[in-house]
Image (tube, grey):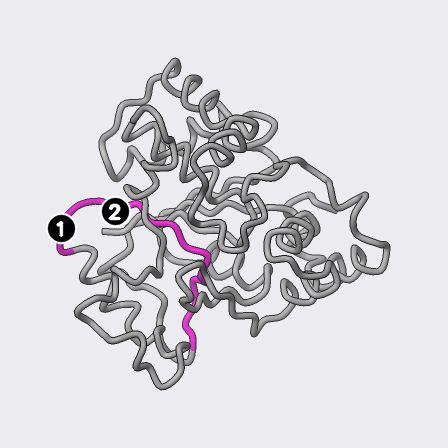
Amino acid sequence: MILWLASYPKSGNTWIRLLLANYLYPKTNNIFENLIKIPRFPNKKQFSELVNLDNLGHRTEIIKYFIDAQDKINLNNEINIIKTHNCGCAINDYEFTNDQNTCGFIYLVRDPRSVAVSYAHHTKISLEKSVNNIISEKYIGINDENLVEFRSSWRINYLSWVKAPYPKLIIKYEDMLKDTVGSFKKILEFVNKFKTIEINTEKIKKTVELCQFQNLKSQENKFGFKEDAFKVGFFRKGIEDEWKTKLNDEQAKKIELFFNKEMKELKYI
């Protein structure tokens, strides 16, 4: 069964993935190597023997094979922790996942104003375009393997997971920044409901120290990070409220208007 690690892009999903990978599968030297233990969805390997991705009528047709790919993943009869930025809802009547493949999920949510700033930098687009992307319910992204991700708007992505009928843990990125050790312990306790793991406070602290942003930036400079498709430096700042000095009033208010209800519920406004 799959235990999803889900989020909208640039919400700290990779940070959590690194924490989990280096806690569960500790390895010295290059801390990015452990990410292979927590793969992304979709990636090309998951669709091998199912469909020739180069021969799709349109690459958005990959959604037709999402369930088959998850069936294939779960043939190992293990709890598979997998990262995704996909919306958790049906696309063109094709479900993203189902009860036979999903046991639960962790969803990491971040202030959409900060998401817009981080995503603009990550993809080398203007702030205006980044704002328009995250409010678009039809937004489709392309990952570093050139595969379609059905992301939709920040709001739809968030609600599609929060309202999904599976055991869930919702973590705010801002809480991760303020109390990384406490938040990561909550994540491990949730994982432990599905997969028996050791929960050791000292080990948690060491893993958090290993995965501090400055160390991640240093490791990226030393080893590179293949998931940085745009080669801009994946681990940039990881700070809270950068939007206050980057977005103009019109851009910030546009986001607040579109996501007013959810942002109030999450105490972002």
Q: Are marks 1 and 2 in contact (CB under 8 Å)?
A: yes
* Residue for point 56% across, 40% down: 172
Task: Please report the bounds of the magenta region as a residue range.
Answer: 75-91
Residue 223 x %, y %: 43, 35
- Residue 189 screen position, x and y as percent: 36, 30
Q: Secondary structure at mark 1?
A: helix
Examine the image and state in which quarter residue 174 appears.
top right
Q: Is residue 5 left or right of residue 125?
A: left
**Can residue 97 be found in the magenta stretch?**
no
Magenta residue check for 84: yes
For the residue pair 188 and 124, the one nearer the viewer reads as 124
Q: Amino acid at mark 1?
A: Asn
The kind of residue on which mark 2 rests is Asn
Q: Please tell me how crowded label 2 is: few (under 14), some (14-19), or many (20+) other residues with Cα within 10 Å.
A: many
Report the front residue among 31 and 206: 31
Q: Is 80 placed above or below 127 here?
A: above
Q: Spatial distance from mark 1 to mark 2, Cα to Cα? A: 9 Å
Residue that carries the numbered disc 1 in the rendered image: 76
Q: Residue at (51%, 64%) from the top-left corner? A: 151
- Farthest residue, direction front: 222
Residue at left 58%, top 33%?
Answer: 175
Residue farthest along the right direction in this orientation? 249
Q: Is residue 83 above or below residue 28?
A: below
SS type, badge 2: strand
Numbered mark located on residue 80 in the image: 2
